[in-house]
Amino acid sequence: MAAKTVSQLVQMLERGEITSVEIVTEYLKAIDEHKDLNAYITVTHETALQQAKESDMRRKEGKPKSKFDGIPIAIKDNICTKGVLTTCASGILQNFIPPYSATAYQKLLDAGFILLGKTNLDEFAMGSTTETSFFGPTKNPVDTTKVPGGSSGGSAAAVAADMAPVALGSDTGGSIRQPASFCGVVGIKPTYGRVSRYGLVAFASSLDQIGTFAHTVKDAASVLAVISGIDERDATSINKPVDFDSTTVTGNIKGLRIGVPREYFNGVNEAIVTAVKDVLKKLESQGAVIREISLQYTDYAVPIYYLIATAEASSNLARYDGVRYGYRSKNIQKLNDLYVKTRQEGFGKEVKRRIILGTFALSSGYYDAYYLKALKGRRLIIDDFTKAFSQCDCIVAPVTTTTAFGIGEKISDPLSLYMADILTIQANLAGIPGLSVPVAKDAHGLPIGVQIMAQHFNEKVMLNVAQAVEECVTL
Ligand code: GLN
């Protein structure tokens, strides 16, 4: 099977050149062959093949659920899939089988997509390397000594190694864009409120968004369109028309004003700076107007994010108490042991660090000094983007300061990992859409992505620019 993009597979299915069973079989084979990458926590072999058979029947009868009927997909293991293990890569949820499905997943099922399995992540999506997973790290398919990025490292690796044509991830501070960049695939974080968070296990509720990974901008956009839209089960989802899909992605950027934030180049590896500048030149030659802009609070983004994200996490993760669901310690003498030992044994080190940090930031006497101050800083960042978007239609910048680094290289230095999020977290704090599209490789052959951001609910423009980028680079 030479095809690997969703649109090619759809075409082949429509022409009757391939069956869903054949497609699913190929991907399951690839998953087996790449077990060493540890991209999947759960593989749904039997149900995937069964669903593929049913899909083929529907097509035969001329009644596909949508044009995507029979296309397989991988889903990050913090998105609830009814009846299928959903662990968040945490010991505390290692046996959790959700009795309901996330809205995003349900929408995929309704469109006829087929679940291949659940992908690895940093525990509760806290991290940027996929090394904090209870199930061990995922390896980067481009160079297996490197991390795939994170927290959606399993989804990025699955697409990069052709173990799925498309995948869902979640992005709270960069967890789709950064692994997409490290693995050389497209990754989109939509506007906050674009995709329902119902059934996405909460990390930091005011920042979390579900998005897509794929080989091409059009694929990632078209599947994102399927999962987008208001949902009565998520009060933060917003009723805006979904005005993009693969057909709106034209790549026409004539006259478009592109802002380049000068602060986004500080401390960035030379190969990445060169790659972004090359792309900007090409976009200019296609008629875009490039102008320098300033995002003056960039240096404050990391402390602001790590106060807000940990505060929200400490509250969200209070539910894992050994009473309602999830892991329960065997070692209980008195009631208090139930909570203390369950949480002590069930959570990993990074998750505990964040719960403690967040609890501290919210505690009486410190709330005003830390949490409230961070909220005020967040407001300044939002205003800064509003100002920036009065001068440009979209922003183009690096995604990360480095290309993929070695497994084990940074994991013992959490602060340096937190600092490395500097270029992705502002989009989450402001709630705007952002994506990463692969543009080049460094001297070691490691992928480099370019980040594109746009105004709230302006995915359409962002995707057009991404398409123009995709068309002008040779990889
Ligand atoms: N790396 C960031 C963190 O550790 C972002 C994670 C994410 O987006 N889920 O919090």
Image: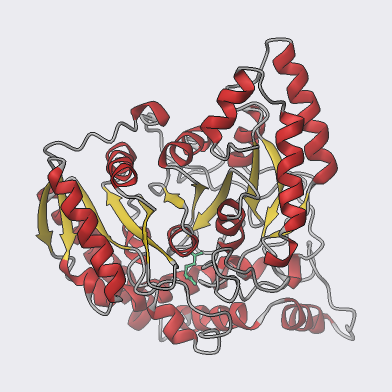
- The answer to whether residue 395 is above or below residue 398 is above
Q: Residue at x 63, y 70 (%)?
A: 123
**Quick one: 90 or 262, which is closer to the camera?**
262
Q: Does residue 228 appear in the picture of this structure?
A: yes
**Is 72 displayed left or right of 309 in the figure?**
right
Count the labels in the image: 0
Q: Position of residue 133 (x, y in %)?
A: 66, 72
Q: Residue at x 50, y 61 (%)?
A: 183
- The answer to whether residue 415 is above or below residue 223 is below
Q: Residue at x 62, y 69 (%)?
A: 139
Q: Position of residue 134 (x, y in %)?
A: 71, 73
**Is 310 displayed left or right of 94 in the figure?**
left
Q: Position of residue 184 (x, y in %)?
A: 46, 57
**Is 332 displayed left or right of 180 in the figure?**
right
> Residue 367 lies in what quarter of the image?
bottom left
- Quadrant into which the N terminus falls: top right
> Residue 436 lies in what quarter of the image?
bottom left
Task: Give the color scheme: rainbow, by chain, secondary structure or one colour.
Answer: secondary structure
Q: Does residue 457 appear in the picture of this structure?
A: no
> Residue 430 lies in what quarter of the image?
bottom left
Residue furthest bottom in the image: 412
**Quick one: 388 or 115, which is closer to the camera?**
115
- The answer to whether residue 423 is above or below residue 393 is below
Q: Residue at x 32, y 51 (%)?
A: 432
**Quick one: 84 or 99, which is closer to the camera?**
84
Residue furthest top in the image: 61
Q: Position of residue 449 (x, y in %)?
A: 37, 59
